[in-house]
Structures are given as C-alpha cells and as structure tokens.
Amino acid sequence: MIEQLLHEHDSTAGNIRNTLSEIILRDKVTLAEIFYSAMLQDAEASKLLSAKSVESHLKPGLCLWLRKLFCHDSRDELKAVLAMQRHVGEVHARADIPIKLVARGMRLLKREINSRLVNTALAADEVVKAILYTDRLIDIAFEEMSAAFVHSRDSGVKVDEGFRLFAAGQNLSLEREKQVSALLDWENRIFRALATEMPLDESSAIENSAFGLWFHHKASLLFNEADGLGMIDEIIRRIDHSILPQLYHDSGQGLRPAEARTLIKAIMADVGHIRYLLGEMFERLNDLDVGRDALTHIFNRRFLPTILKREIAWNRKKGDPFHVLMLDIDYFKRVNDEYGHDSGDRVLQAVAGLLMNQVRASDFVFRYGGEEFLIVLAKVDHTQAQEIAEKVRRCVEEAEIPISNNRVVRVTLSIGLAGNDGHPDYQRLLDRADKALYAAKHAGRNRCVIAQE
C-alpha cells in the first residue's frame, strides 16, 4: 500500500499537488461542515452521531485527516498517513459505523474537492490529472481503512462470541432465579400499589425495574437474538406502553372494576409468558467451561469492547446515559512487599467482591489489569454515577480485609469517572476515565476525579 501511495505522489506534478494542498488548507473546515451536515441529515448515519460529538471531536478529526492526506511533503509523512488510515478504520470498527457509510462520505468529499479544482488556475488537462490524483488518494486511504476495519470487526465478533461463552459458564440456575424473583417483585409492587390506591406513573414501568435493566443491558449478551429476546421485548413494551398507562392514577380513576381486573389479568398473563420464555432461554444455554479472570472470577477486560459498544448503541437508541469508573488500589505494591503476594491476591479477591456487592444487576465489573478494576454503570446520570463512585470508595476504605495469620489490612481506591459524551468510539471514553484516574492519584489518592469533557 505504501508503494501505491508513493507512486501517486511521485508521478503527480508538484503544481497539482500544491494546488490541492492549498484547497485543503483553505477549505478543510468548510469540507468538514458539508460532510457532517450531510451525515446528520442521512437517516442511517444520523443514528450513529450526536451533534455534540460532531462539533467537538469529529469535525476537527476530519480536518486533520484531510490535511495529512493531501498536504504531505515527504515520504515519511506518507507512511504516517497510512498509519492514520489504519487507526481511522479501527475507530470505525469500534464505533460500529457501517463501511458503506464511510464509502458514501468518501464520494461526497471527492465531489466537493473536485468541484473546487475546476475553478483553479490549472490547465484543463491538469484539472483532469488533479481529479484523478484526488480520487486515487482517497481510494488508497479508503482501502487501508477498510482492511483495518474488517480485521478489527472480525476480532470483535470473536470477542462477542467469547463473551457469550463466558456468560454461559456462570451459575445459570442462580441467575435464572434472581431474574425471575426480580420480575415477580416488580409484579407484586404494581399489585400492591393498585390495592392501596397508590398512584402509578412512568417510573412504574417494567423497563425501569431491576429486571428491566438486566434484560436490556445483559440479556442480549447472554442469549442469541433467536432465543426469544424479541418476544420478551415486545411483551415489556406492551405492558409499559399499553396496559400500565390505562392503570395510571389519572386515567385509571374512571375504570370500572371489571376493566381493572381485565388489565391486571393481562399483566399476570404477560409476566407468566416472560417467565416461560426465560426458562426456555436458560435451558438452551449449554454449561460451557470458558475463560474468566482466574483470581477474581469477574469479567476479563477482553470482553469490555462488547459491553461498551452495546451500551453506546443503547444510548443512541434510548438516550439513556451511562458512565465508566476506572479504579486502582492505592499503594498495592506495599501490600505485596509487606505481606507477600498471597496476601495481595486475597486483597484483589476481596476488592472484587466488594465492588460486585455495590453495583446493580445491570452493571458490569471487570478486572482491568493488575490492581486496576473497571465498572460500567448502565442508565445512570452524572449525579447518580458520582454517588455510586463515592459509595464504592467508602465501602473499600472501611472494609477490613483478612489476610494470613489472622491479620487484616485496609486499602483505598483512586477512581476516575467518565460519562458517555455521545462519541461513537468507546476508546475515547476509556482514555478520559484513565486520565481522571491519573489525576486522582496525582491529587493524593483515595478520591474520585471526574473526567473533563
């Protein structure tokens, strides 16, 4: 690929390359505006973008890409250009941006750049050569991006499947009972509210219950789409958007007893159907011996892309915010040095257990590496995420962790908190959380620092 790029560079006259470079340097901001204006108006592309991320990150990124592709002066810069194309392809794969949308954008850029070439001082034959040079440069860049995209996407598919196998190796009987219990708890709360004439509103929806959060954020990772997820989702929407609104306090006052009983029976029937479908889905899962973090028995970081991509997709679909906590045990090396590595392992296991006990069924806890952990908090706003981070920090700070010879140790956590800002690449979210964690360490440890936007 580098040879192709070098050939195009060396075989194109300097005045043509300079003219193109001048156009890009002058109009790169305008080109980015046109590009993302078209993308935001595209029904398919707009689902993957937010106005905030376009303005703050994506437009500047496109300007940089254009400048590097068309304004290079040396062969070394050309090699850097190809490295950037591979990075862009990996970003698109992480963000689940379909390759056809990238191709659509490349055509738009070609059209806009070529239309500007026509109005330059280049001779007619030079304009033709400049247009061909533009097309070839963008095609080479697109080819390199596509190769990186496909490679990253294939790797992602393997990780997704690996997560499903990992999840299948959990205690399925316990998980099944927990979720059935959560479902029945929601049903009982609704019936108690009706019996005591307590008002119902949108917050009573099954989607907002512990079961609903688990279903939307974890069930799709555990089961295949064909396993009945769509049917359960349809039942949940029917309950939340058809049956419950008729029982809301304001609209339900005029219901006759017979009508109310009919609606209650409908809820009971739908809950029973969900229980049946859950049972079938759990029964179909094989008890597989799959990998996990050998020490703490929580998720391994290799499953993190699967979770974050799904949370970003859910955010685009429903608008629900989510946050990431990056956590590090302070002065962990001292524990190993003073008490030995066996004691250090017990501390890691204990901290993992404390973290699991502080999160909800819809959240995810990972051992990120060494003494670092990561938590993905589903459907929480900024204030709630801060409260959870502080609760986790206090819980670990106050815990007495038993080690060898009837001794106990205390440890603290430094935490970096970052919220999803609409950017489609999950790696940016992780980088922001990591920088916030570093700031917490630098500020004295045993604290939570919020990432900058």
Image (tube, rainbow, N blue to C red):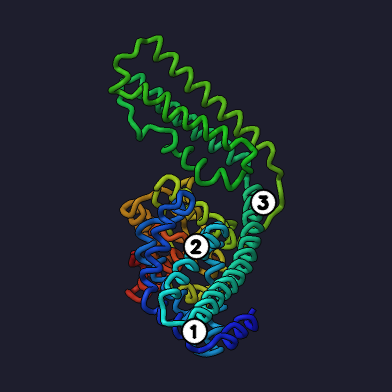
Measured as percent of width and height from the top left, residue 198 is found at 30, 24
* Residue that badge 3 annotates: 165
Q: CA distance from mark 2 to mark 1?
A: 23 Å
Please indicate, yes or no, whether residue 125 appears anywhere in the rendered image.
yes
**Helix, strand or loop at disc 2?**
helix
Please indicate, yes or no, whether residue 347 appears anywhere in the rendered image.
no
**Helix, strand or loop at disc 3?**
helix
Q: Residue at x 48, y 82 (%)?
A: 123
* Residue that badge 2 annotates: 105
Q: Residues within 10 Å of mark 2 (few under 14, many from 20)?
A: some
Q: Quadrant of the N terminus?
A: bottom right
Q: Are marks 1 and 3 in contact (CB under 8 Å)?
A: no
Q: How many marks?
A: 3
- Left or right: residue 35 versus residue 139 is left
Nearest to the observer: residue 230 or residue 118: 118
| Residue type marked 1 | Ile
Measured as percent of width and height from the top left, residue 98 is found at 55, 57
* Residue that badge 1 annotates: 16
Between circles 2 and 1, the one closer to the viewer is 1
- Left or right: residue 227 versus residue 36 is right
- Left or right: residue 425 versus residue 414 is right
Measured as percent of width and height from the top left, residue 295 is found at 60, 62
